[in-house]
Amino acid sequence: MSHGETPNGLNHHARSQAPLIDLPNVPGLGGAIAGLGGGLAMIIVAAMLSAATGGDIWREPREIAAPLVGIDSPIGVLVGTVLHFLTAGLLGAVFGIVKRRV
């Protein structure tokens, strides 16, 4: 037996894993949460790429909102960001529902 092991071979010093959070059994909820996480990652990368190329970091949300409020609207960033996350969550939920049924 090495230092730190119990007679059954388990290590006392090993960290225990935190329990997973159980989501309510709502179809598509897990997919929607994953979609929102993916949408967040996408919007961060898009802003970083815009900044790296010398562009405006708010270009993508403004372009998403342009058909609804115009490209120069003061609320374009907010509308575009909300639409981006709604779409990401919806696509994630659809994926989660389809995956559950296959």
Image (cartoon, rainbow, N blue to C red):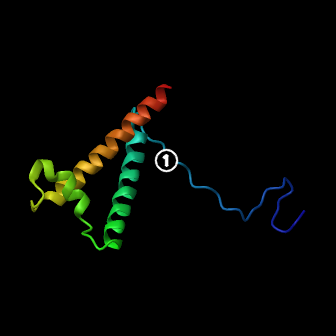
Farthest front residue in view: 53
Image location (x, y in percent) of residue 36: 36, 49
Q: How many marks?
A: 1
Image: 2 above or below 89: below
Q: Quadrant of residue 17?
A: bottom right
Residue hosting label 1: 21
Q: Nearer the viewer, residue 30 or 69?
A: 69
4 horizontally vs 23: left or right: right
Q: Quadrant of residue 91?
A: top left
Q: Nearer the viewer, residue 16 or 98?
A: 98
93 horizontally vs 5: left or right: left
Q: Nearer the viewer, residue 26 or 28?
A: 28
Q: Going 9% across and 59% down the picture, which residue do you hit?
A: 73
Image location (x, y in percent) of residue 57: 27, 67
Image: 27 above or below 63: above
Q: Nearer the viewer, residue 48 or 39?
A: 48
Q: Label 1: few (<14), some or many (≥20) within 10 Å?
A: few
Secondary structure at badge 1 equals loop
Farthest top residue in view: 101
Q: Going 24% across and 69% down the picture, which residue do you hit?
A: 56
Image: 5 above or below 98: below
Q: Going 33% across and 71% down the picture, which residue do you hit?
A: 53
- Regarding residue 6, the answer to whether it shows in the image is yes
- Regarding residue 25, the answer to whether it shows in the image is no
Image location (x, y in percent) of residue 7: 87, 56
Farthest right residue in view: 1
Image: 90 above or below 43: above
The three-letter amino acid code for the residue at tag 1 is Ile
Image quarter in which the N terminus is found: bottom right
